[in-house]
């Protein structure tokens, strides 16, 4: 039980007449990278908002770091950090000033040391004294993730961390996310990019029309796919093929 960073059972949420989550179940192991994959409007952000205590569910339960999100929201907030699709960085400040600001808000004893360590860890030391308005998209997103790690939360949520980035910047962010997990941080990310889930995640869950329609490791998801037609080379199915095949099965009913 305690090796689960996140446990979700039967999660439901409606906005007025529209039921967005229709009973979502998922588990995320500590220190792993978990990708919630789904098309736009599938309810991925709603799941993150419930898990990060920004929104209350209508039904079902969710526990983060062992704390029930509805009963102990304060304890959940102390366990997590959230990086949204839109960077929360202040353009006018430098990279270092942004980090110092957060470190002071979190009442850390050694804000300067924390800022410098994170700048170095995210390859931003050379740009530390430049205004963020001069940063590239990838640098800005790296700074955003660095800011969410001030105070070393055990669980970090990344809502579509690479939306709007060019391919080079995406690869940069992927490296950062892999390094987080290698350091023992649990990473829960949402994405609509199949190759992002394929690149990063230990576990993938596919959210479609308010339900998880498949979940497992990439290898496990590949077994759901019809066997490859043996030509000269056996072609491994991509996650894209799997996604379409599973959705096709659902819709073919």
Image (spheres, rainbow, N blue to C red):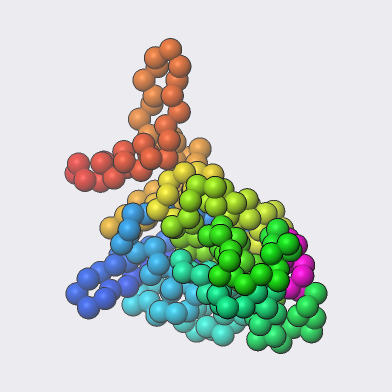
Report which quarter residue 109 is drawn in.
bottom right
Q: Main secondary structure of the magenta part?
A: helix
Looking at the picture, tell me which residue is in the foreground, 74 or 39.
39
Task: Give the answer, above or below, for where 42 lies relative to 216.
Answer: below
* Left or right, 152 with reference to 166: right
Residue 24, horizontal then vertical, whole percent: 38, 63
Residue 121, horizontal then vertical, whole percent: 73, 60
Task: Give the answer, above or below, for where 253 lies relative to 70.
Answer: above
Residue 130, horizontal then vertical, whole percent: 66, 70
* Left or right, 207 with reference to 140: left
Looking at the picture, tell me which residue is in the foreground, 189 or 253.
189
Region in magenta: 114-121
Quadrant (top left/top right/bottom left/bottom right) for the N terminus: bottom right
Looking at the picture, tell me which residue is in the foreground, 110 or 136.
136
Quadrant (top left/top right/bottom left/bottom right) for the C terminus: top left
Report which quarter residue 89 is drawn in.
bottom right
Residue 116 belongs to the span the image colors magenta: yes
Which residue is at a point 65% across and 80% down the rendered structure image?
102
Which residue is at a point 40% across and 80% down the rendered structure image?
56
């Amino acid at each position: 039980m305690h090796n689960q960073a996140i446990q979700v059972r039967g999660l439901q949420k409606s906005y007025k007449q529209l039921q967005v989550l229709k009973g979502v179940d998922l588990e995320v192991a500590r220190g792993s990278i978990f990708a919630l994959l789904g098309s736009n409007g599938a309810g991925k952000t709603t799941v993150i908002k419930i898990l990060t205590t920004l929104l209350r569910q209508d039904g079902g339960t969710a526990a983060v770091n062992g704390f029930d999100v509805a009963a102990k929201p304060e304890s959940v907030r102390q366990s997590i950090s959230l990086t949204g699709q839109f960077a929360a960085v202040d353009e006018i400040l430098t990279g270092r000033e942004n980090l110092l600001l957060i470190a002071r808000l979190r009442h850390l004893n050694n804000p300067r040391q924390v800022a410098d360590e994170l700048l170095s860890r995210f390859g931003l030391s050379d740009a530390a004294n430049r205004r963020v308005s001069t940063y590239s998209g990838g640098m800005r997103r790296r700074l955003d993730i660095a800011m969410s790690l001030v105070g070393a939360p055990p669980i970090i949520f990344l809502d579509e961390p690479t939306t709007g980035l060019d391919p080079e910047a995406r690869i940069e962010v992927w490296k950062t996310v892999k390094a987080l997990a290698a350091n023992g941080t649990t990473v829960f990310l949402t994405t609509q990019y199949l190759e992002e889930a394929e690149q990063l995640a230990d576990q993938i869950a596919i959210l479609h029309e308010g339900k998880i329609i498949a979940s497992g490791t990439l290898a496990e998801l590949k077994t759901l796919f019809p066997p490859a037609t043996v030509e000269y080379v056996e072609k491994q199915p991509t996650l894209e093929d799997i996604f379409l095949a599973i959705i096709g099965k659902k819709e073919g009913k």
